Image (cartoon, rainbow, N blue to C red):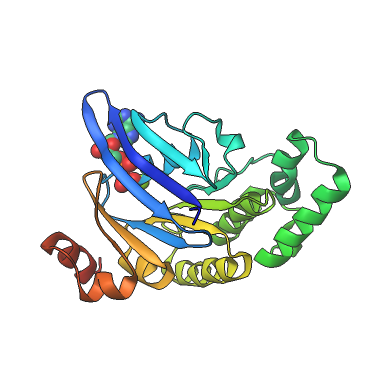
Amino acid sequence: MQHSVSIRDLSLNFGNVKVLEHLNLDIAQGEFIVLLGPSGCGKSTLLNCIAGLLDVSDGQIFISGKNVTWEEPKDRGIGMVFQSYALYPQMTVEKNLSFGLRVAGMPKAEIDQRVQRAAEILQIQPLLQRKPANLSGGQRQRVAIGRALVRDVDVFLFDEPLSNLDAKLRSDLRVEIKRLHQRLKNTMIYVTHDQIEALTLADRIAIMKNGVIQQLADPHTIYNKPTNLYVAGFIGSPS
Ligand code: ADP
Ligand code: MG
């Protein structure tokens, strides 16, 4: 079977600090993988390597069977959603959603169709003519997800997308991301340090410590059969 994402013996150093070491990970088409671990363990670094925002020190990354290790981010078939929304403040929601497609030269009719579809899925149609400053945090994060959605990518990458939101919004949006995955059935790689998010969203959880995956398994197995004390302590003591 061809994997959606394959990471082969990936290492990344910042200077002489080893942040990721000989990491391997195979992700199936349509799988929801959560990278879970404490702050500083290398989650964002791994995600940024997959996105092409960081050059790897060693190893390879395959997306849909193609070696993308040295491909530009825009050529990798991925969409990324960050913790801070990274919206263009001077543009309306509609323009924020369509910007990348306009730059790519897509015909206007298709752009409009994609923007409408994303707005419908994320329930942001009434917000299309507003600017980011006039949106709540949860609405901004929906727009950020929408920007990945309109590009019709194979793989979604999320880096702690909910951590700037209050508890109620966080649980609402968590349910929505789950629904989005059930509807789109694309591959999602989701970084968090939140055990509840990991247990409720993931098909499989990769528990990381110091740039190494300690255990990779479904939530039930991780919770009930942790392979070591680190995993048991981390998943057993919600913050
Ligand atoms: P996480 O997302 O799990 O909190 P990161 O991937 O951001 O962790 O960081 C992993 C480690 O790499 C940390 O020790 C961090 O200080 C270090 N690091 C991250 N980015 C850089 C950088 N640009 N230069 C040097 N060190 C970095
Ligand atoms: Mg991070």
Location of residue 106 in the rendering, given as x and y in whole percent from the top left corner: 80, 40
Q: Residue furthest left?
A: 229
Q: Residue 95 versus residue 205: which sits nearer the camera? A: 205
Q: Is residue 153 visible?
A: yes
Position of residue 20 in the picture relative to residue 142 (left or right): left
- Which residue shows up at 17% across the image and 65% down it? 227
- Which residue shows up at 62% across the image and 69% down it? 183
The quarter in which the C terminus is drawn is bottom left
Q: Residue 139 versus residue 193: which sits nearer the camera? A: 193
Q: Quadrant of residue 45?
A: top left
Q: Is residue 99 above or below residue 158?
A: above
Position of residue 181 in the picture relative to residue 235 (left or right): right
Location of residue 96 in the rendering, given as x and y in whole percent from the top left corner: 69, 45
Give ligand 1's quarter of the image: top left
Q: Residue 220 versus residue 162: which sits nearer the camera? A: 220
Q: Is residue 36 above or below residue 200?
A: above
